[in-house]
Amino acid sequence: MSQRKTQAPRPPDPKRDQRQLRSLTRRIASLDAHNIDELYGLEPVYEPGTSPGGRVVPEEFVAVQCPYCGERFETRIDLTAEDPGYVEDCQICCRPIEFGIEREDGGALLGVKVQRMD
Ligand SMILES: [Zn+2]
């Protein structure tokens, strides 16, 4: 008695599925890059306190303490700047403060360090 397999539905071709998946992923990736261009390049949109679609807001207001006079003041942090360090004058005593921005991998603000320049 010979063993006969019952007629099974044809198994899906894994190679073809992978190809479809890859092209789909490529399309999503290019769409995403386009969206980022729109968000950060042409018309940056800033809504205080919100990050639409889970995206990182391009700027944030933080309270810092002046390392010279000890006064606290609010300043705007530009999260789109590539350089994490910059210099801004204290709003009270006008002496130059060195700001160091700490960011997560995704670009979200972790913290701000302030340093005297002398
Ligand atoms: Zn100051």
Image (cartoon, helix red, strand yellow):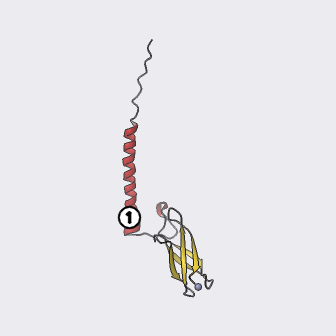
Question: Considering depth in this image, is 14 or 38 the residue closer to the camera?
Answer: 14
Cβ of mark 1 under 8 Å from ligand 1: the answer is no
Q: Quadrant of the N terminus?
A: top left
Relative height, residue 20 to residue 82 (above, below): above
User: Whole-percent x and y of residue 106?
Assistant: 50, 62
Give residue 98's position: percent from left, percent from top.
54, 79
Q: Residue at x 41, y 32 (%)?
A: 11
Quadrant where the C terminus lies? Answer: bottom right
Give coordinates of residue 63: x percent, y percent: 58, 76
Quarter-of-image position of residue 36: bottom left
The residue that appears at 39% across and 47% down in the rendered structure is 22
Task: Write the residue at 58% across / 74% down.
Answer: 113
Q: Amino acid at mark 1?
A: Asp
Q: Pointer 1: residues within 10 angstroms few (<14), some, or many (20+)?
A: few
Between 112 and 58, the one lying in front of the other is 112
Q: Which residue is mark 1?
A: 37
Q: Position of residue 70 (x, y in %)?
A: 63, 83
Image height of 67 relative to 109, above or below:
below
> Which residue reaches farthest right?
70
| Picture layout, residue 77 above or below residue 118 | above
**Count of number-bearing discs:** 1
Q: Secondary structure at mark 1?
A: helix
Taking the view exactly as shown, the residue that stands out farthest to the top is 1
Point 52% across, 69% down: residue: 49
Please identify the residue farthest to the bottom as the structure is shown. 93
The quarter of the image that holds ligand 1 is bottom right
